[in-house]
Amino acid sequence: MRIDLRIRLLVLTLFIALPSFATDGYFSIGYGVKQVGQGGAGIAFPQDSLAAATNPAGMVFLGDRFDVGLSWFRPIRGSSISGNAFFQPQSEVSFDGSRKKNFFIPELGYNHQFSSNLAFGVSIYGNGGMNTAYTTPIPLFSAGPTTFRAGVDLQQLFVSPTVAFKVNSHNAFGASLNIGYQKFSAQGLENFANPNFSEALGDVTERGFSNSFGAGARVGWIGTVNQSLSVGATFQTRTYMQKFDKYKGLFAEQGGFDIPANVAGGVALKVHPKATVLFDVERIFYGQVKSIANPDLPFQAPLGANNGPGFGWHDITTEKVGFDFKLTSALTLRAGFNHSGLPFDGSQNLFNILAPAVVQNHLTAGATWGLQSGKEISLAYLHAFQNTLNGESSIPQTFGGGNANLSMYQDSVGISFGWGK
């Protein structure tokens, strides 16, 4: 494949930046179709040139390689309000947050092996995100004859140039520069665009997309203990992003929305010449970003202020178990399970009507078919089981009191094409 075609594909992926979604809070359970098929596990088990998104050290084990993929993602999200004095207090009213259901998420990676001990590559992938598109206005957020339907759209993309090297036969290290791009829009929040709630009334809702760029880094290590056991560790710094200027009256710190740091470790154990079992643990530090972590109502400061309300998210831990089995020389099968902690509790449900990230358990399956001349096709399926989080007394009395309840489940199918040698 000519190098100019690879570059064109890289640039194309940069600009399409299609919506991305996630299930470990708002992060993806894994990066690359192969990794998703094994529950998102793979810190010590690199398989394609998306490896830098998880552990940069993995790129030195791949050889020359090119991967491109696309996933169809279908999240079904919704909410309900009950016991509210201002809005049908005797009944529970449900709201459908899935006016838009189908999304397509691209991925692309390239790796060049300069020698057996040195590699350089680049991975382009959706880091995560969230979308709600309610079919009707939500009265607590927007009331009146000309109100907008409630919803938010957060999209995040990383471009990660990476260098990886082996210091000896047992240890490899890698480092990536994470160049981040994100955009955000909100609508249907007119009730908060007033002096009682926000310090920037014109920058709360209906401002279209606001764009933001920034940078951070990821480092990683893989240690080969013996022919059957590998271990790995990785750390991603906080990614410092420009502020969402069009929403400086909504997010804390006048529109601040950095991407949190995370740290993870993993094990790959070959239990049979054809079978490998994977186990990863990851900690995501949502609590370090005020616009994500500050509690919602009652307001301690106006929206947009340094200590203004957020979504009340805290740090979470995710556990990932994967299984990779080489059935034949041409066919590899995968399966996995991912469990994520809840990023917030029911007391924070009101604002999280806009971001109902309540799924916790994910079951995955995948396969790779080898073709001729180092080419292969991979598939993955993910199901995030439905979860409901009831928020007893999560609506303050100033908003009529009552309960905000959240629910979500998800399905995803991905396909990728890889070419290596």
Image (cartoon, rainbow, N blue to C red):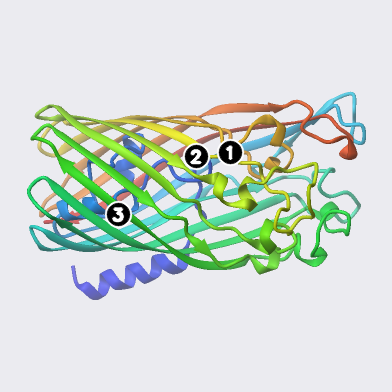
Q: Could you tell me how many numbered marks the image carries?
A: 3
Quadrant location of the N terminus in the rendered image: bottom left
- Asked if residue 138 lies left or right of residue 225, the reply is right
What's the residue type where badge 3 is placed? Ala
Q: Secondary structure at mark 2?
A: loop
- Which image quadrant is residue 89 in? top right
Q: CA distance from mark 2 to mark 3?
A: 20 Å
Query: For residue 357, which numbered disc appears in the image?
Result: 1
- What residue would you read off at disc 3? 52
Q: Position of residue 160 (x, y in %)?
A: 35, 62
Q: CA distance from mark 1 to mark 2?
A: 7 Å
Query: For residue 23, which numbered disc appears in the image?
Result: 2
Q: Nearer the viewer, residue 113 or 256?
A: 256
Pair 2/3: label in front: 3
| Residue contact between numbered discs 1 and 2, judged by CB atoms under 8 Å | yes
Quadrant location of the C terminus in the rendered image: bottom left
- Which image quadrant is residue 176 in? bottom left
Q: Secondary structure at mark 3?
A: helix
Residue 251 in view of the camera: no
Q: Secondary structure at mark 1?
A: loop
- Which image quadrant is residue 209 in? bottom right
Q: Position of residue 105 (x, y in %)?
A: 44, 53
Q: Position of residue 300 (x, y in %)?
A: 78, 47
Q: Residues within 10 Å of mark 1 (few under 14, many from 20)?
A: many
- Asked if residue 310 lies left or right of residue 384, the reply is right
At x 20% / y 49%, what residue is drawn? 376
